[in-house]
């Protein structure tokens, strides 16, 4: 494994072909934690050389998702489509040294070759027909305008071995490696060439990426050798699987990162959830802030086996992090979801809902009755089982008169008066409180009723009781 004296430099290198999903966010997070724990740099590279799959708004969405999760990069993003000439120059260097060659095979010829290999049940690999073309002939054909790609000339014998930071020692037989394309006929590089050129230019010390790239690692090491560059250290992260043991996807209920934001999740909870997909600090702790994750992170503690994602745990974690917020911070985060309500108005209501919330999006409906009158009542919700409309109307009228005469408007006096009323009427407190809950809030599920009555104020409570009794009459 290469040794580096300078601080670690790592990068997250997404292709802008869609939004930032959980698997990609986990890769970014492990890179970020590694860099910060080592006192190094976390960089961003946009690998947009696959022009056919490019989505114009994807880069902005990915960057927004990373910022929301608290991952900031230390240098301006490198955009590969802006470096086309650099890759062409690198390909020319490999042609000059003999580490690469031009391939003039047509798409039709390549498809026929693959079809014959499939028919013989052989691996589909380029048959190296153009590798034997003399250099002067190759130069002449290229100068004449003949269409070509540039392929890496892989060694045919021996093995390539390296130590992976997650997977351990890995060995590949060189005769199984394809002479893959480095530069396409349109002059754009493939991932393989651009990856090596940019990681060298960006002085990347460690490449931490998904294990889908593990089969390409020997090609990349050999490419660094061909350029005579020091290769980075590699760490390949295992897949994240859903409950059916298939790669985690939307079919399992997974969302893109910004969809979690819109659904009312906290970035702290998502970060914590992602960090524990295949890693743990080796202790019983399982709720950690970003600073704590940075302090405790170690790449050696990443498990080489696939991680199983339990999205129910993310919801539980979100509730835990909501409860850790100060009332001021919770009110500030909820304000964006209740644009007509100020933070100052929300602040005193936070103790009523903070212990009940699983997501921020649950709060507006829970708190709406503090800021808007209940809509039309459904009589069946006001009438407990075994009672009729007349009994419910009487209960509402008695509750109104009881509350109207209270000298002190405190939770203690309100609760004592209403429980005494229920006993006088021969009702259970549970039935009376449900009737009052619907009358005062318009909902059957709310924050604690007594505290809500106290905070609403006497005039508003009495007016709503009058309105509900009229609806039943």
Image (spheres, rainbow, N blue to C red):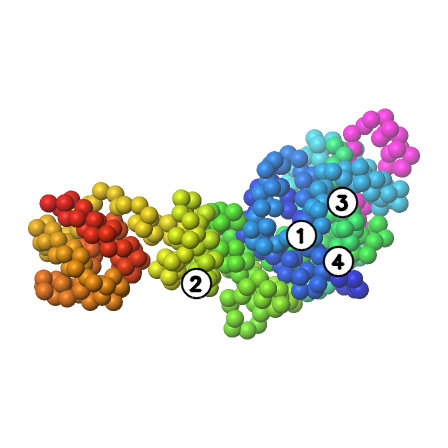
Query: Distance of mark 4 from mark 1, alpha carbons?
Result: 16 Å
Question: Are discs 4 and 1 less than 8 Å apart at CB?
Answer: no
Q: Earlier in the sequence, mark 2 or mark 4?
A: 4
Query: Distance of mark 1 from mark 2, alpha carbons?
Result: 29 Å
The x, y position of residue 472, in whole percent, is: 13, 46
Residue shown at the point (66%, 35%) measured from the top left = 51
The x, y position of residue 151, in whole percent, is: 78, 41
Q: Which of marks 3 and 1 is nearer the N terminus?
A: 1
Residue shown at the point (79%, 62%) measured from the top left = 6
Query: Distance of mark 3 from mark 1, alpha carbons?
Result: 23 Å
**Mark 2 or 4: the one toward you:** 2
**Mark 1 or 2: the one toward you:** 2
Where does the magenta region start and end? 132-155
The kind of secondary structure element at disc 2 is helix
Q: Point out the residue furthest to the bottom here.
A: 283
Give the number of the disc on residue 323.
2
The kind of secondary structure element at disc 3 is helix
The x, y position of residue 375, in whole percent, is: 25, 43
Give the number of the disc on residue 205.
4
**Mark 4 or 3: the one toward you:** 4
The residue beneath circle 3 is: 193
The residue beneath circle 1 is: 73
Q: Which of marks 4 and 3 is nearer the N terminus?
A: 3
* Residue 154 falls inside the magenta stretch: yes
Query: Distance of mark 3 from mark 2, alpha carbons?
Result: 48 Å
Question: Are discs 3 and 2 less than 8 Å apart at CB?
Answer: no
Query: Is residue 107 shown left or right of residue 392?
Result: right
Query: Distance of mark 2 from mark 4, alpha carbons?
Result: 39 Å
* Along the line of sight, the residue nearer the viewer: 209 or 314: 314
The kind of secondary structure element at disc 4 is loop
């Amino acid at each position: 494994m290469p040794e580096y004296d300078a601080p670690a430099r790592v990068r997250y290198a997404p292709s802008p072909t869609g939004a930032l999903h959980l698997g990609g966010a986990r890769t970014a997070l492990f890179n970020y934690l590694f860099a910060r724990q080592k006192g190094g740099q976390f960089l961003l590279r946009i690998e947009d050389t696959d022009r056919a799959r490019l989505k114009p708004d994807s880069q902005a969405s990915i960057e927004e998702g990373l910022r929301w999760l608290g991952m900031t990069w230390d240098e301006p993003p490198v955009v590969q489509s802006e470096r086309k000439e650099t890759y062409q120059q690198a390909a020319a260097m490999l042609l000059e040294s003999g580490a690469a060659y031009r391939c003039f095979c047509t798409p039709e010829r390549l498809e026929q070759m693959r079809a014959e290999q499939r028919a013989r049940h052989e691996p589909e690999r380029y048959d190296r027909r153009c590798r034997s073309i003399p250099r002067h002939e190759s130069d002449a054909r290229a100068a004449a305008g003949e269409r070509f790609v540039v392929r890496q000339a892989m060694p045919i014998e021996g093995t390539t071995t390296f130590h992976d930071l997650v997977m351990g020692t890995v060995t590949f037989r060189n005769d199984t490696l394809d002479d893959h394309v480095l530069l396409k006929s349109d002059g754009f590089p493939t991932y393989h060439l651009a990856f090596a050129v940019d990681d060298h230019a960006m002085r990347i010390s460690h490449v931490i990426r998904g294990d889908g790239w593990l089969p390409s690692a020997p090609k990349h090491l050999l490419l660094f050798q061909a350029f005579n560059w020091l290769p980075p250290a590699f760490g390949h992260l295992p897949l994240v699987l859903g409950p059916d043991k298939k790669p985690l996807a939307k079919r399992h209920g997974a969302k893109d990162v910004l969809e979690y934001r819109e659904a009312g999740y906290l970035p702290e909870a998502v970060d914590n959830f992602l960090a524990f997909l295949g890693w743990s600090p080796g202790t019983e702790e399982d709720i950690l802030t970003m600073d704590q994750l940075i302090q405790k992170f170690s790449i050696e503690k990443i498990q080489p086996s696939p991680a199983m994602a339990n999205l129910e745990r993310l919801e539980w974690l979100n509730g835990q992090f909501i409860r850790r917020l100060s009332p001021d911070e919770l009110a500030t985060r909820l304000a964006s979801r209740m644009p007509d309500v100020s933070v100052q108005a929300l602040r005193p209501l936070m103790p009523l809902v903070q212990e009940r919330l699983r997501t921020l999006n649950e709060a507006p409906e829970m708190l709406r009755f503090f800021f808007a009158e209940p809509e039309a009542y459904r009589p069946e919700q006001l009438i407990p089982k075994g009672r009729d409309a007349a009994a419910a109307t009487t209960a509402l009228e008695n509750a109104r008169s009881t509350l109207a005469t209270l000298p002190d408007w405190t939770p203690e006096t309100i609760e004592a008066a209403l429980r005494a009323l229920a006993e006088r009427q021969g009702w259970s407190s549970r039935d009376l409180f449900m009737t009052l809950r619907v009358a005062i809030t318009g909902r059957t599920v709310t924050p604690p009723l007594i505290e809500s009555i106290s905070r609403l104020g006497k005039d508003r409570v009495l007016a709503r009781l009058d309105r509900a009794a009229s609806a039943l009459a």
